[in-house]
Amino acid sequence: MIDLEEIRTKLVQDYRQLWINKHRFELNDDEVDMEDCNSKLGYIVELLMFITGWSREAVGESLASHINYQIILDPQDNPKEWDLNKFDYVEAVENIPYCSVDDFPFDDGQDDYSLEREGFIIDHNPGNEKEDWVYIPAGTIMRFDGADCNGWPEFTLRMKFNNIQLDFAGDPFKVKLV
């Protein structure tokens, strides 16, 4: 026999998947499927209000906390195991150490001053005080572009002036779905 908690959990999972699909339909200007997702999302909210006895605001806050959940992305894992879909937007939860300033893939005319102007953080490497590193600051919005040809996750970062595409091949880092 299924209890109410299992039903609630299933509805929250369905809501999250519909929310992801709706976002994908918005990107592709597919209004018919987007409206279908909106009606199903509304139905799930009504069901959760009935099951839990919560107000619409309380259900909305609960669903938002489940949608905007944090992921620890490990670039060393198989791309099929990443909990992200192509074109998902994420936000860096903490400063992400990217690489040394010398190894950063500069565009023509960029230097470490222009990186700081874009919003990157230049700071010492904790393991080697003589080496400066580029850090992606917490709060940076990034679009997941899938795996590159080497199997590393690739993101387009929305910085102050330009969008910058970077692949990540280092340590695991935390992101939050937005």
Image (tube, rainbow, N blue to C red):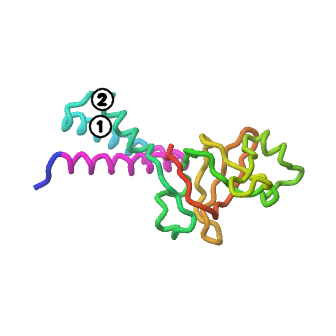
> From the viewer's perspective, is residue 82 above or below residue 58?
below
Secondary structure under tag 2 reads: helix
In the image, is 60 to the left or to the right of 98?
Answer: left
Residue 102: quarter of image:
bottom right
Q: Please state the extent of the stretch shown in magenta in the rendering.
A: 5-33
In the image, is 47 to the left or to the right of 110?
Answer: left
Q: Residue 26 in the image: x percent, y percent?
A: 51, 45
> From the viewer's perspective, is residue 154 above or below residue 109?
below
What numbered label is drawn on residue 128? none
> From the viewer's perspective, is residue 93 above or below residue 144?
above
In the image, is 89 to the left or to the right of 35?
Answer: right
What numbered label is drawn on residue 56? 2
* Residue at 29% in and 41% down: 44
Determine whether label 1 and label 2 are within 8 Å by CB: yes
Q: What residue type is labelled 1?
A: Val
Q: Residue 1 in the image: x percent, y percent?
A: 10, 56
How far apart are the two marked residues, 1 and 2, measured between alpha carbons? 7 Å
Q: Residue 108 in the image: x percent, y percent?
A: 88, 54
Q: How crowded is mark 1: few (under 14 residues within 10 Å), some or many (20 or more)?
A: many
Q: Residue furthest left?
A: 1
Secondary structure under tag 1 reads: helix
- Residue that badge 1 annotates: 45
Earlier-in-chain disc, 1 versus 2 = 1
Q: Which amino acid does label 2 sit on?
A: Arg
